[in-house]
Image: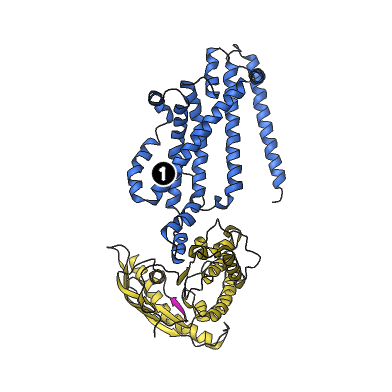
Amino acid sequence: MIGGKRSAGLRGLGYAVSILVVLGLWQYLSRRAIIPLLFPSPLSTLHVGLELARKGQLQADLWASLGRILAGFTLGSAVGVAAGILMGASRRVRLLLEPYLHFLRFLPALAWIPAVMLWLGTGEGAKIALLAYTTVFIVALNTMVGVARVPRNQVRAARSFGAARRQIFFLVTIPATVAYMLTGMRLAMGNCFMTVVAAELVASDSGLGYLIFSSRQWMQTELAFVGIFLLGFLGLIADHMFRMTSTRLLWRYEGASGSRTTR
Amino acid sequence: MAYITFRGIDFRYGPKGPLTIRGFDLELRRGEFFMLVGPSGCGKTTVLNILAGFEAPTAGEVFVDGTPVPGPRRDRIVIFQEPDSLYPWLTALENVEFPLRVLGVGRSERRARAGEALRLVGLRGHETKHPGQLSGGMKQRVQIARALVLDAPIILMDEPFGALDAQTRIILQDELAQIAVRTRQTILFITHDIHEAIFLADRIGVMTAGPESALKKVVEVELPRPRTRGSAAFGELYEHVHQILSEEVRRVLRREDSLL
């Protein structure tokens, strides 16, 4: 690990320089804009953001979005893992469910919004359902692939030790698949951040998505940028935290099967 | 008399695949170290997999101690060529404990027995490492320890040292020779390395070239143990086995030429 620390420092410096240059350029260009309303500067965006935070509205929107993401993501992951395991382990279940999996995973949650509003109304349930929807297929698909890719010799070894089917399932198949489940969940987390905006746009009076779209109503472009930045940062933090917790708690399983991404 | 019997084994992959093995007969004595050599693609591994119970023969039967082989059993432990049969999420010690865990042995007894097996293969001090942190040779030692921990009467080794560098391979051969003498298990070992075969085996079986391969000849290795690799008798035996084997290898090459 020679120079590991130095290269990390160098990378941080590179990021900082890049970000400062872009912010500076933005600040400069927004001052020269003909209609400032269309191009708010970073400073005025920050100002509006702080103002909103002082009133407590920013925090309220932030927690509203986060809560929905957490609920939908958890629900979708649980269903996706269970379905993926069943599909990977049983040919019969796979044949029954696979057509739907491949059909539905190309349909964005966006397309379902009108139907879901009809069925579930405009409450929290509808938004959580949409977020669970956007999570479930990618988690199921990755889990299924993981179950199918358990190295044959790991199963054969267990059989030669006299392991029963149930023991092979819990002691070999599940641990060998954890890395694939995590890959699917990490991709799904990204989907959730995209879907939450759309869900809150159509049927909500809270959340960062609502904040972004309400800016048009008040002719306050800064509001949109505040929401955009916050969402971006939240996504980064969520991804980082997901990776940290999974490496800290589940590192044993991380390299288990040379986890691969399947979209 | 015979402990393990292969009788008239035919094998084909799938219902319409080509016949890879035809009329394979072999008898193994209890406690012997039997080496199976043959040109690549002759179906050595298939023979081992059939005895392990992983594959079912198309025709013929395999008996262990007079009973037909129904499927995998813990009296026949397999050591694979690739270390991918180790569980990467478990430590070396937990991997060796695994067969005992399957058996339902209590935690403290498991720990003790697995630790003992790891010491036997020279891995003391590496108990808490994961397979990813071990070298190729160490991983194969873990596999050997995992096979020893059950005290299974039969060990099946499918080119276990094939992927190792020459130095590591020689060290592991020396250690295995000592372990085999001590534990008196019946070992079926597959290799394409004649040196390895003569150094370890009580008897060497040479297979004919595939497809439709069978056992060609069995050679007794009557060298005293512990063996040295450089002796004149070792060299003579090498020439003898090499001659039998090279006829078969040449047949493979001729057929490959005619296909071109």
Q: Residues within 10 Å of mark 1 (few under 14, many from 20)?
A: many
Q: Split into 4 quadrants, where in the image is the C terminus of chain B?
A: bottom left
The answer to whether residue B190 is seen in the rendering is no
Q: What percent of the width, then of the height, locates residue B113?
A: 58, 69
Residue A41 position (above or below residue A236): above
Query: Which of these two is toward me, A92 or B141?
Result: A92
Numbered range of the magenta stretch: B33-41
**For chain A, what colour was chosen?**
blue
Residue occupied by mark 1 = A83
Provide the secondary structure element on which disc 1 rests: helix
- In magenta stretch: residue A47: no
Q: Amino acid at mark 1?
A: Ala
Residue A250 position (above or below residue B137): above
Chain drawn yellow, letter? B
Residue B109 position (above or below residue A237): below
- In magenta stretch: residue B38: yes
Q: Split into 4 quadrants, where in the image is the N terminus of chain B?
A: bottom left
